[in-house]
Image: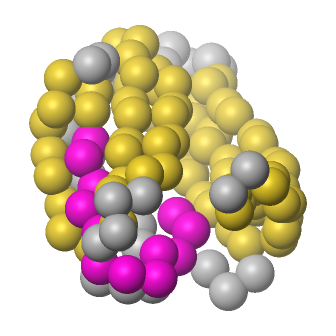
Amino acid sequence: MAPERTPSIADVYVDGRLVQSVRLPPGQFTLADLPVESGLGQAHVVIRDAFGREQSIGLGYYLSTQLLRRGEQEYSYVAGKERSFTGSTVRYGRTLGTIFHSIGVADWLTVGIQGEAAKDL
């Protein structure tokens, strides 16, 4: 996530329900192990800094707990530019990317990889 310049609080909503509030120190941060349920859903994070400014980040997700059949694949490859807001100005910065790829090796075994990349990440 983008760095904040003051201590902040991140409220995490899953499908419109507040599931977690996290205190954030100044600087870059990562939110991990969020309490999401399997299936299709929406996650929404509202970050409030010490001055009351808000930043809102929304993300759709699909989490499957099913094994893939032998030969089936599930994947997502995404790349884009980091977007930041300053007042009413939008700026685009470094290039970011994320990948997810799972393969059904056997009907009883699914293996996969997940990765994220950006300069200084």
Query: Between residues 100 and 110, which one lies in front from this camera angle?
Result: 100
Residue 67 lies in quadrant? top left
Which residues are drawn in magenta?
A: 1-12
Q: Is residue 107 above or below residue 90?
A: above
Way the structure is coloured? secondary structure
Residue at the image point whose x is 67% and y is 31% from the top = 75
Q: Is residue 101 above or below residue 6?
A: above
Query: Between residues 56 and 121, which one lies in front from this camera angle?
Result: 56
Residue at the image point whose x is 16% and y is 32% from the top = 18
Q: Is residue 92 above or below residue 5?
A: above
Count of all numbered marks drawn on residues in the image: 0
Q: Is residue 68 left or right of residue 74?
A: left
Q: Is residue 53 left or right of residue 2?
A: left
Q: Is residue 6 highlighted in magenta?
A: yes
Residue 34 image position (x, y, % from top left): 25, 46
Q: Is residue 7 highlighted in magenta?
A: yes
